[in-house]
Every structure is written in structure tokens, then in C-alpha cells.
Image (spheres, grey):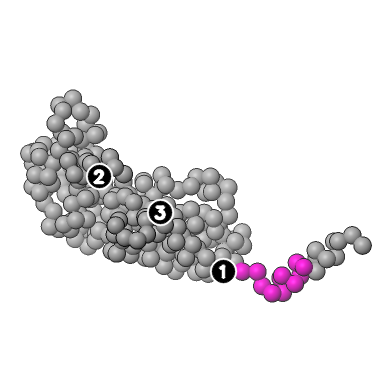
Amino acid sequence: MKDAARRNHEPWKAFQARQRNQDVKRDAVLQTAAHMFLEEGYRRTSMSDLAKRLQITKPALYYYFRNKEEILVECYHAGIALIEELLDKAIVSRGTGLEKVSAYIEAYAKSVVLHEFGRCVSMLDESELSSETRKQVRALKRRIDASIRAYIEEGIADKSIAPCNPMLASFAMSGAINWIGTWYKPAGPLSGQEIASHFTCLLTEGLRARVTTSAKRSASSSKAAKKPR
């Protein structure tokens, strides 16, 4: 996080050394663009503004990206990849459907409160994009919904999640997490990790399958019957 903050504060340093890896320079463009899109707004951030912040020429900037839309799509790609990187693979490989939903929600929330690429996914409005680019961005966002929905369906099947409408549940979760980006302040009373943990608990607890009174009574009777006399 400190390294990312430093790059945002002095992004031009990535371009000062001629021998610097091209991937490092491209990453500096993306990191800076994400920061400016969130700070100034996508529409108000021009390629000229971005080049100025990076202290490079516009032709040099076009060497890395053809246009501003391409940069935004790459920010979305980076945000989705980040969520998947943060996902607890141990839980996803062996956990119940509810545990998988919980892991995904926490990864998604962390990406929003702790990383600017994650915040781009939740906050930037794709309505300003061309129709073709909008399709790409919406396809990326559907990856999140499809993953959460699949885990909810799995939880209903393994009975860790109460019967519900998976589509509505996934929409409710994604909407709640996306909204974090509009009010979250790093200097606030709760840390990003605390917010992610609270949201994970709040959003998954409502899905948890409840044991009915009759089921509890039946379980108790079954245990009593098995006790040695």
C-alpha cells in the first residue's frame, strides 16, 4: 500500500530511468489513471492531464495505450483480478457454499476499501463509454455476479444457505459493497479491514440456513436415544 501511494504521489519516477522495465511504466500509467479517475472523474480526466501528471509527452503515453477508454477497461481488468487474488483459495476449494460466499464478499470489500483498482470497479460509471467498451466492462462486472450467484446456489444445495433467489441475493450483495466506495474515508474511525469484516458478516448472516425448532427437537431426541443406558 505504501508503494502504491508513493507511485501515485510521484508517478513520473517510473519514467525517469530509460532502462526501466516497460511493464513497470505501463503499471504506473494505470495506477495514476485509476487515481485520477476516482479523484477527478473519468470524463474530466483527459489524456493530456494524465501525461502531465506522469511528466511525459502525450505521444509517449499513446505508446502504452491507444485511448482513455482502453485505460479504463484495463483498470477494470486489474480490479477483477485483484478480487480473485484476494479470494481465500483454501475456502473456495473445500468450504461450504456459505463459506465461499463469505470469502468472496470479504475479498470484494477489501478490494474496494484498500485498493484503487477495486474502487474503480465499484464506482466508475460505464454509461460514458462507447457501446463496445461498455459491453466489455459489463462483461467484467458479470464475472463478479456470476461467481457470487454460483456460490449461493451451491450453498442452497448443500443446505448451508437458506432457500432464496440467488440472483436477487447476489445483486443485493454487490450493490451494498459497491456503495462503500461513495462514503469510505481512509481516515475514518474504522479501518478498511474492519469495514470488510463487518460487511462480510452482515451480508452473509442473512443467508445462513436456520435450524428449525422441530429439527432441534429431533436432533436432541436422536442424541438422547443413542446414549447408553
Q: Give above or below for 218 relative to 42.
A: below
> What crowding class fits label 1: few (fewer than 14 Cα within 10 Å), some (14-19), or many (20 or more)?
some
Q: Is residue 188 magenta?
A: no
In front of the other: 12 or 141: 12
In front of the other: 187 or 206: 187
Alpha carbons under labels 3 and 1: distance apart: 30 Å
Quick one: label 3 or label 1, which is nearer the N terminus? 1
* Circle 3 SS class: helix
Tell me the residue at 38%/65% (across/down).
Answer: 176
Tell me the residue at 57%/51% (across/down).
Answer: 95
On the image, the x and y values in percent for residue 69 come to 19, 51
Residue under pointer 3:
193
Alpha carbons under labels 2 and 1: distance apart: 44 Å
Could you tell me the amino acid type at mark 1?
Answer: Pro
* Circle 1 SS class: loop
Could you tell me what secondary structure mostly forms the magenta stretch? helix
Q: Give above or below for 87 relative to 208.
A: above
Q: Quadrant of the N terminus?
A: top left
* Residue extending farthest right: 229
Could you tell me the amino acid type at mark 2?
Answer: Ala
Quick one: label 2 or label 3, which is nearer the N terminus? 2
Residue under pointer 1:
163
